[in-house]
Image: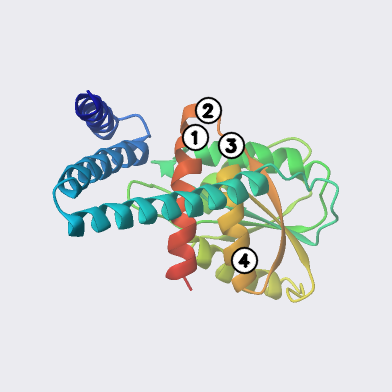
Amino acid sequence: MKKKRSICIIAILFFLGLALVIIPNGMRFTGFLFLGAAALWAVGLLLRRWGEKSRGALWLWRIFLTGTGLTLVLLVSIEAAVVFRGEADNSAVPVDAVIILGAGVNGETPSAALWSRINAAAAYLETHSGVPVVLSGGQGPGEAVSEAEAMYRALSGRGGLDGVRWVLEDRSTSTAENFRFSKALLQEQGLDTDTAVIAVVTNDFHCFRAHLIAQRQGLRIVDVPAELPWWWLTANYYVREAFAVVKTVLFDR
């Protein structure tokens, strides 16, 4: 009975994951996660049955369980930190500059993630004017204009933002480059980036990792989180972000 239940769970995870990967819905990562979970469950099932016949396999089963459990604890801990950072409200903190991090552009049209950042930035700048604002994002595949240019077009014509000092950074291809190039531009504007407090507008799920990368660049930042309009995409990106944090800690410099 337990074997049949496990096989049923594996099949559900596999076909659900396959559907999310194949069907365009913005949740490919969740699909791959389900496929990985199906594979792990299958490996665990095989090791458990093998462990019933062999003492050596029983130890492999125990090591597998321990490793899986520790990995889950690590990822859940990271996820908790990511969620906590994404819910921060720093709207009352005085800042010396603002950096708006770019996201995907479809041709010349901002993606849902970028629109959410644009709207969050517009609301924030209504009460934090008079400081330089860096629009940071280069031009990638499928983008007819840079992310910086797309943000400028969307923000520069909005009422109440006429006096904003826009600074376009249109070379970056990663978050680390966002901060590195934006820091240089702010220094050209006469800002002491060693002591300045900088507001960074990005999506809520991205705040924790952006904060980590900014600290490596020697920047003091406060988060201005932007929410996506659809909860299922938010959940997908929050889960993905835990793995991205591990990658950043281990490999990104």
The residue depicted at 70 percent of the width and 36 percent of the height is 158
Determine the secondary structure under disc 3: helix
Assess disc 4: are there few (<14), some (14-19) or many (≥20) residues with their C-alpha within 10 Å of its C-alpha: many
Q: Position of residue 14 (x, y in %)?
A: 23, 32
Determine the secondary structure under disc 4: helix
- Residue ID for mark 4: 214
- Point out the tag, 2 or 3, that comes first from the N-terminus: 3
- Residue ID for mark 2: 231
Assess disc 2: are there few (<14), some (14-19) or many (≥20) residues with their C-alpha within 10 Å of its C-alpha: few
- Point out the tag, 3 or 4, that comes first from the N-terminus: 3
- Residue ID for mark 1: 235
Give the left or right position of residue 109, taking residue 130 as reference: left
Determine the secondary structure under disc 1: helix
Give the Cα separation between the discs numbered 1 and 4.
Answer: 24 Å
Going by the numbered disc 4, the residue's amino acid type is: Ala
Circles 1 and 2, Cβ within 8 Å, touching? The answer is yes
